[in-house]
Amino acid sequence: MATFISVPLKKSSEVDMVKPLSKFICATYSAGEEQGEYVRAVEELNKLRKSAVGRPLDKHESSLEILLRYYDQLCVIEPKFPFSENQLCLTFTWKDAFDKGSLFGGSVKLALASLGYEKSCVLFNIGALASQIASEQNLDSDEGLKTAAKYYQLASGAFSYIKDTVLSALNREPTMDISPDTVGTLSQIMLAQAQEVFYLKATSDKMKDAIIARLANQAADFYGDAFKQCQYKENLPKEVLPVLAAKHCIMQANAEYHQSMLAKQQKKFGEEIGRLQHATELVKTVASRYDEYVNVKDLSDKISRALAAAKKDNDFIYHDRVPDLKDLEAIGKAALVKSTVIKVPISQKFTDLFEKMVPLAVQQSMTVYNSRKAEIVNRLIGQMREATNLSNGVLASLNLPAALEDLSGDSIPQSILEKSRAIIQQGGLQSIDQLIKDLPELLQRNREILDESLRILDEEEATDNDLRNKFGQRWQRTASNDLYKPLRTEGGNVRNVLDKAVQADIVVKQRYGTHREMIALLCKPEAELNAAIPSANPAKTLQGSEVVSVLRALLANINKVKMEREKLENDIKSAQFDMTSKFLTALAQDGAINEEAISVTELDNIYGGYTQKVLQSLKSQEEILGNIQNSHQEFSTMRQSNADANQREEMLKKLAAAHDSYVELSSNLKEGTKFYNELTEILLKFQNKCSDIVFARKTERDELLKDLQQSIAQQPSAPSFPAVPAYQSTPSSTATPATATSSVPTPAPRTVFQSKPQPPARPPPPAIQAQAANTSTPPAGGAGPIPPATEPVSTPGATQPPAQGPPYPTYQGYPGCYQMPVAYNPYAYGHYNMPYLYQAPGQAPYPNVQQPQQPGYPYPQQPYYPQQ
């Protein structure tokens, strides 16, 4: 009698997860032990998928464990990788579990670049394999009953979870097997079978009849609900509907049987007979309609023996009145099963392969936090460097400290000699010339990479547009124009940055041209430099004056301020804080990250003190420079004023300014070179991303073209329709088929899900002939008009089919008669065509190249280097 329904597994195409995931890891994480560990984890994940969906699975718990581990792994990596059509693109292809394939060998399949789709299909296989394992259990043993009940409830939970999540996970219409209606029906079927297992367990344990009756009645109710949901599911196997109808009758019969035993114990002999008679009718219905699916001989014999004994005792001894079916008290229900809640991790042996990798939300928050941090660091360092440049400019305009060192009027001041040696040590004019010469080559290389990246996008988009115009609505995939918008935006940002860099290069070259002559003079030997500086009359009278002493003290103070700034700059650059833990804690507690609130608070705690120190440094410099200017004015009036002295002082000012310009130009050019080299790396990654998505689109395009060509080839050259049968044509005076068959019982509904239904006890259909222009003309051969179809004549003694549907009781507590299909309709079977939809591959985004500018040189967010 025990016939249980199991669900077939979905089949998937092979997917290479190693290449795209490894590319994302290498692009996101710096080379080292962490990157290598993540790449190895990706390889393990790929092996796990091959074990879970790439080979046939045995109906064993070990196979189910593999599926559970893979599903858990998908759930934990989903927030850690940017799975989407235009970022990290993995296209998963799955076939409909219930589709048997067309005449040409095809089958309904769907390809989507969605991890949610992969999760739903894997969870479907978990439910399917759990149902198969449960169906293989030995229900004669206590252990087998427990295992079957456990896995039926797991299957029900898996299908129920898919029902609630599949539409949001896919964002499009799924295949029929994982549609909410289908998986909802499967979940109800599994729940009904789990309840039946509990009924069998109670029967095996010889529990009280009242309990067993309630368990059986609840199982009948579950099967009835499943039958109602299943009536119009044409995609399910043909045996599902009749098995559910039979199981509903069988469990109801069992409930009536055990309730009759309870009535016998309570000496309600009339009720006992009434319930046994109802159970007999239910079993006869099953035997007459669903005998090829279930065997109820043992149950039928048991009920028949009990009914015969009860009638005999009542006829000879008790003479109790047998109540009508509607007057019997409703049997109670006891539900001992519920769908298993799907909560990750499902597997008890699960180990997170990417445990150290933080979720994508944390990665994105860290990116924004680092941008905020860089903005504050650049602002503070920029303020200090701007102040230092201002100080250097003021001192150079006053010819300090050279004026204090040049009291003799005929030797090179020591500060000028030190500046000359510093420039020569750094390479002099040659280093500047080489850096300026390299810039155009670096710029051109970046432009060529960017242009090539956008060119391949343009070519693929043009091809996609041509095919879209050619095939129209049949070209069902995301338009390249929409898919490439983020990439084109990224490319446009890079081009804007390159344009700004070109303007910065022009500014640097102009500044270099202004100071080149003086820089070249500083690069000459000491004797030539001394000869180029005009001599002046000595001013030895100022050697021991108080003004000179005050100026020297003030210069020492300004130098002290500069040294403190260098230390403060290093402290600001090296300030670190573990924001990852902060964001992880916020994500775990709140389920989301308020990055702005957390970042602003922490950055204020970290850099609030440094901001105050920078402001104090700027204020100190302002006071010292004011005092220097006042003292220098007094110093100038005390010096002898002549033309030679003025020329010498002017030359020394130019040399000091040339040194400062050299340091600034060298720093800017090195930063520009570093910027172009770093931008080259970013552009190469951008080019790889464009190449990958174009390659994936081409692969998808070829597969879609192949499917379209097969679809077109399978279509008939011209539509053909069958001729209308004579018995369906407009009758003149004869009875309609409905009238002719109104008194004949309808056949059993088990033919609803047959691909080529064979209606029972139906005469062969009338011959279909082409309808002539004049329908009254008899066909060739002298045959008369085709008579309407008639039902076969019943022979005496033959068993007539029972009335449509089992004789469900209508009294309180019973679910009532379930409407089953009443007749075979050869035109009622439609076909659905699920479109093939492929999503575009891609790679993860790379850091945005737009960054804050430095003062004086508009390269994006480059590190600062201390002034020489």
Image: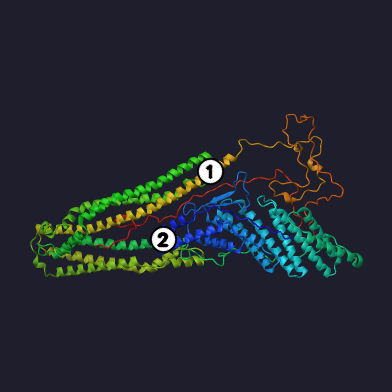
Which quarter of the rendering shows the N terminus?
Answer: bottom right
Give the alpha-carbon distance from disc 2 to disc 1, as whole Å.
Answer: 39 Å
What x and y, as percent, mark residue 521?
16, 56
- Give the mark nearer the N terminus: 2 vs 1: 2
Q: Nearer the viewer, residue 555 or 237?
A: 237
Please rate how many residues cluster around mark 1, counting C-alpha atoms within 10 Å: few if below 14, some from 14 to 19, many from 20: few
Q: How many marks?
A: 2
In which quadrant of the rendered view does residue 476 lie? top right
Residue positioned most to the left: 537
In front of the other: label 2 or label 1? Answer: 1
Is disc 1 placed on a helix, strand or loop? Answer: helix
Kind of residue indicated by mark 1: Lys
Q: Is residue 327 visible?
A: no
What x and y, as percent, mark residue 517?
17, 53
Q: Is residue 785 left or right of residue 101?
A: right
Residue visible at 24% across and 59% down in the picture: 663
Q: Nearer the viewer, residue 62 or 550?
A: 62
Is disc 2 placed on a helix, strand or loop? Answer: loop
What x and y, as percent, mark residue 4?
69, 59
Which quarter of the rendering shows the C terminus?
Answer: bottom left
Q: Is residue 638 left or right of residue 225?
A: left
Residue positioned most to the right: 316
Q: Nearer the viewer, residue 544 or 435?
A: 435
Q: Is residue 474 visible?
A: yes
Q: Residue beneath label 2, please?
A: 29
Q: Residue beneath label 1, please?
A: 706
- Pointers 2 and 1 in contact (C-beta within 8 Å): no
Q: Is residue 712 above or below residue 196?
A: above
Q: Is residue 424 left or right of residue 91?
A: left
Q: Which mark is residue 41?
A: none
What x and y, as percent, mark residue 783?
79, 31
Kind of residue indicated by mark 2: Tyr
